[in-house]
Image (cartoon, grey):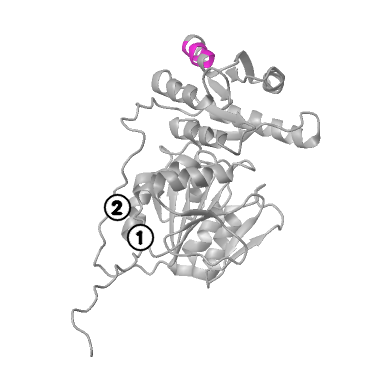
Amino acid sequence: MIRVLVVEDSRVMAEYLTHIINADPDMTVIGAACNGAEAVERVRCEKPDVVTMDTDMPVMNGFEATRIIMETVPVPIVIITANCSSSDAKYTFMAIEAGALAVLEKPHCLSDAQGAVGAAEIVRTVKLMSAVHVIRRWPRAATGKKIKTAPHSSAAPSACRIVAIGTSTGGPPVLRTILSQVPRDIAVPIVIVQHIAPGFLPGLIDWLSKDTGFPVHIASHCERLLPGHVYMAPDNYHISVRGDYRVVLSDSPHENNMRPAASFLFRSIAREFGGSAIGVLLTGMGCDGAAELGDIKRAGGTTMAQDRDSSVVHGMPGEAIKRGSVTQVLAPDGIAAALTRMLPRMQPPQPASAGGTR
């Protein structure tokens, strides 16, 4: 039996989460904490298998509680919050950085069909995350870390023209790791499909921009992608890229139960860029993008998948490996190092001539 601790300051929401979790025969709620400080103490004493964590709470917020838990008695933590905008989004992604595994949105209505879908997703994610082996997070010595940019290489530039990345559960901290280690002066754009609850994307983009130094944007229809910039598919729209780097957004049907879907992006990348593309599939549930990553490989491009040991959930990359869609299987640091080696760099400005014509 999976033992769950619910951390939620709203009594109504705590009772609702308790109800839907207890309805699953494999799980039971061992208690509810109404603030982060109480959560830390109950985790220490009761050793639950998984914790659901709100972010905006009195006494101690969810970020601080997650940080303390992961530094002392680590346990799988799933963020469940209604606060996907304003300053509270900051706490959500700080909690992810501190070691929380996934972020979900609280159902807006507890009784309609949409609420039922949200409830099913919460139950599925909590159950899946309970099986993830988490490790102790050591306190960071400073509030931020310095980003080392690799020196500009004089070697011949790669033929790569674009990088496409797909990821889901556990993706945000892996994206942060990779983007933090790739040089800022790469001469190609990076396009990302990240499965995330609607409304959380602006907070994720703000977090990644501030933490990695890359300019990160929500992609717009017909926008032309710029080198050295990162673009993420907007909520509820598939994204594809034309050979002239123009973005095409689509509300066509879901693929692999997802919109945006990595499969949709990868197909366009294989078709339009072929052997000059790099496709990457990171941690995530399901199989989105696994087959279509193979399209990039067959077109002559380079394909990478995150390894099992570093993945929160090895579903998407594992399926790609199983299908033979992958040329390299690497941990996040290895993916960053490979991209650093392979991507062309912007040429530094040439010094002005000492002489001149009169």
Amino acid identity at mark 1? Asp
Instruction: Farthest residue to the left: give it.
Output: 354
Secondary structure category for the residue under label 2: loop
Instruction: Farthest residue to the right: give it.
Output: 112
Amino acid identity at mark 2? Thr
Quarter containing the C terminus: bottom left
Residue 208: x and y in percent read 46, 45
Residue 113: x and y in percent read 80, 36
Please name the residue shown 29% across and 67% down the image. 348
Q: Is residue 172 magenta?
A: no
Residue 146: x and y in percent read 31, 43
| Above/below status of 59 relative to 340 | above
Residue 306: x and y in percent read 43, 46
Residue 185's label in the rendered image is 1
Image: magenta residue range: 38-44
What secondary structure characterizes most of the magenta part?
Answer: helix
Mark count: 2
| Above/below status of 124 relative to 6 | below
Q: Is residue 323 left or right of residue 123?
A: left
Q: Which residue is mark 2?
A: 149
Say whether marks 1 and 2 touch (CB < 8 Å).
Answer: yes
| Above/below status of 52 relative to 243 | above
- Quadrant of the rendered image containing residue 85: top right
Is residue 134 visible to the viewer in this orientation of the structure? Answer: yes
Residue 291's label in the rendered image is none
- Work out whether mark 1 precedes mark 2 in sequence or the reverse, and give the earlier one: 2
Please name the residue shown 54% across and 39% down the image. 169
Q: Residues within 10 Å of mark 1 (few under 14, many from 20)?
A: some
